Image (tube, grey):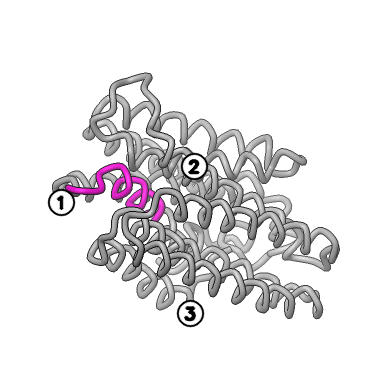
Amino acid sequence: MLAWLRLMRLPAVFTAVSNVLCGCFIASPTQAPPTLQLCLLALATAGLYLGGMVLNDVFDAALDAVERPERPIPSGRIKRSTAAVFGTALLLIGIAAAACLGISSAAVAGLTAIAVLAYNSILKSTPAGPFGMAACRFLNFTLGASIGLPLGSLPDATILTAATALAVYIIGVTWFARNEAGTASRFGLIGGLLVLLSGIAIDAWLISHKGATIMSIRGGSMALLLLGLNLIMRAAAAITRNVPRLLQQTVGLMLLCLIFLDAVLVFALTGSADRALTIILLIAPAVLLKRVIPMS
């Protein structure tokens, strides 16, 4: 069982749930969707994300045999063919759950699945890899805002800006993480960090222009400043020492910070502390599971 949980990188799925809930809450600032719809959203994003993680290892089996032989597939604990079937089934479960929310949600989930497959099979090892991963997160965020949206319609500018900020952040994380299994270029690591911080800066701009109240704008801006400073200090230590273990821990922190970032956005843009708390609580299971299951 533990091998399957490690194959799916289970702790990281809470960041995907956080993203989709953030998109949903921002799209409906005055009235949250029914609990059933929120559960279906969580199931949809979990299926898409976990399926993507499994298929990532399916496509990377040969590379992992050299760089990370302890992973479930190269170590022989899980057959590659079995993992491929399981990963595909998870993607289909995600699309099916989204379809229960409406045709627009099904369409976004389908596009997300295509983006996941494109990233894992073609884009990951190319210069376009970080952009492919960013597209997956962008679509996942907009999935949260797709409930009740007419087919072919775009979410409003606030949602698109927040999704773009997330995409930029993810480009930075992916760039930073590209060589986490070996000695990485310090220039590449610094570049990834700067791109990540650009994503936070876009969120800060969005909060300053679209914040719900003066208090939420000030609180959200201060929280983003503290987040940015924390990431700079942690990343600087990892870049200075430039060893795989510290780089991997820093990537894990960057991913966990997505939950905090989403909670800040929800509080600042909707003024709802309750909804922000709903998201921030996702950190607890992610941190607990991270102790036994790697996030990257």
**Secondary structure under badge 3?**
loop
Query: Dividing the picture into quarters, in which one does residue 141 lie?
Result: top left
Q: Name the N-terminal-most of marks 2 and 3.
A: 2
Q: Residues within 10 Å of mark 1 (few under 14, many from 20)?
A: few
Q: Main secondary structure of the magenta part?
A: helix
Question: Which residue type does callout 1 highlight?
Answer: Thr
Which numbered mark, 1 or 3, is in the foreground of this view? 1
**Secondary structure under badge 2?**
helix
| Residue identified by numbered label 2 | 161
Q: Is residue 223 left or right of residue 96?
A: right
Question: Which residue type does callout 2 highlight?
Answer: Thr
Query: Dividing the picture into quarters, in which one does residue 73 lie?
Result: bottom right
Residue 78 at least partly seen: yes
Q: Position of residue 171 (x, y in %)?
A: 64, 49
Q: Name the N-terminal-most of marks 1 and 2.
A: 1
Q: Residues within 10 Å of mark 2 (few under 14, many from 20)?
A: some
Image: 266 above or below 81: below
Q: Position of residue 164 (x, y in %)?
A: 54, 43
Q: Residues within 10 Å of mark 3 (few under 14, many from 20)?
A: few
| Residue identified by numbered label 1 | 35
Q: Quadrant of the N terminus?
A: bottom left
Bounds of the magenta span? Answer: 17-31
**Secondary structure under badge 1?**
helix
Residue 14 at least partly seen: no
Which of the two residues, 59 or 160, is positioned nearer the viewer here? 160
Question: Which residue type does callout 3 highlight?
Answer: Arg
Which of the two residues, 256 or 204, is positioned nearer the viewer here? 204
| Residue identified by numbered label 3 | 291
